[in-house]
Image (cartoon, rainbow, N blue to C red):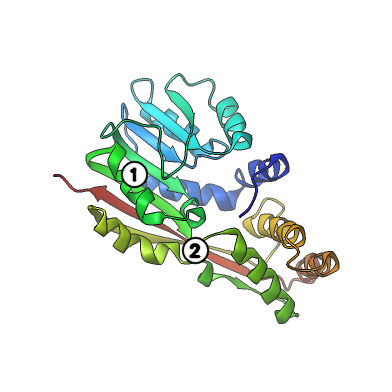
Amino acid sequence: MLKFDKETTRLLDIVYQGADITRRRQASFDALRPEADEKIVDIGCGNGLLTLELARAVGSGGKAIGVDPSPDMLGPAQARCKAFDCVEILTGTANDLPIETGTLDKAVSVQVFEYLDDIPAAIVEAGRVLKPGGRLVIGDIHLDSLVWFSDDKDRMDRMIASWDHHFTRRDVPAILPSIMRDAGFVVENVVPLTTCDHTLKPDGLAMMMMRLMARYAVDNNHVPAQEAAAWLAEQKALAAQGRFFYALTHFVVSARKSAP
């Protein structure tokens, strides 16, 4: 698993405000359709960017609750949202939300479920805290959609194989609809959002993945440091030559809790 330490948190704080990740966050926000005075939980809130946007949407009469297990994430989230009295930042996990049963109007989670050991239990837990008819929106990537050019395909495959160790499933969007239905949800929509780059942007998703993947592969002894460095250098050289290409699809799954 990827460790969300202070160094990783600083990197994510920069890239999560870039255009690529902002579009993902906006897609989940749009699917959730937050309204004034609603109570909404942001499951795996990270640094609080989506929680802050929810706070603006629900206003002083509502409640935006951010839940995350990482102290290094909770600190920035609390600081980011401190001006809003309607925000509550809590320590917890997707499988154990510190929220009373049947008290929320909506729940949202962006790129969290790929890290969970028990996705069905997390869906049930989300259903527990929602009112009947409550809305659940989960955004996550399908790693089988990854297209990434390299002149050294074998090395690229080794880097991707290393990265596969940092999450529990690479196909979360494909299995979510059936899991949601089994948990008593009505699945309403699945919307794809593809990031496709032919340039290497400093605040882009590809740049973030490059830095995280190289560090992760070396720290976990999946590839030698020289190989990770060569992979990074090649991608930067491809970008300088106008030969860089990267694409990855994120899916937003929307459902509502069935009435009893």
The reply, left or right, for residue 124 in relation to residue 49 is left
Residue 63: quarter of image: top left
Amino acid type, residue under disc 1 in the picture: Ala
Amino acid type, residue under disc 2 in the picture: Arg
Question: Gap in Å between the C-alphas at discs 2 and 1?
Answer: 19 Å
Residue at horizontal 39%, vertical 31%?
A: 57
Pinpoint residue 71: horizontal percent, then vertical percent.
60, 34
Q: Nearer the viewer, residue 20 or 187?
A: 187
Task: For label 2, count other residues whose C-alpha is less than 10 Å away and answer few (under 14), some (14-19) or many (20+).
Answer: some
Q: Which residue is mark 2?
A: 169
Q: Secondary structure at mark 2?
A: loop
Q: Nearer the viewer, residue 18 or 221?
A: 221
Task: For label 1, count other residues whose C-alpha is less than 10 Å away and answer few (under 14), some (14-19) or many (20+).
Answer: many
Residue 233: quarter of image: bottom right
The reply, left or right, for residue 185 in relation to residue 151 is left
Q: Which residue is mark 1?
A: 126
Q: Nearer the viewer, residue 201 or 41?
A: 41
Pinpoint residue 257: horizontal percent, then vertical percent.
23, 47
Residue at horizontal 76%, vertical 64%?
A: 221
Earlier residue among tags 2 and 1: 1
The reply, left or right, for residue 212 in relation to residue 40 is right
Pinpoint residue 205: horizontal percent, then vertical percent.
62, 56
Residue 126: quarter of image: top left
The reply, left or right, for residue 166 in relation to residue 64 is right
Residue at horizontal 41%, vertical 30%?
A: 64
* Mark 2 in CB contact with mark 1 (< 8 angstroms): no
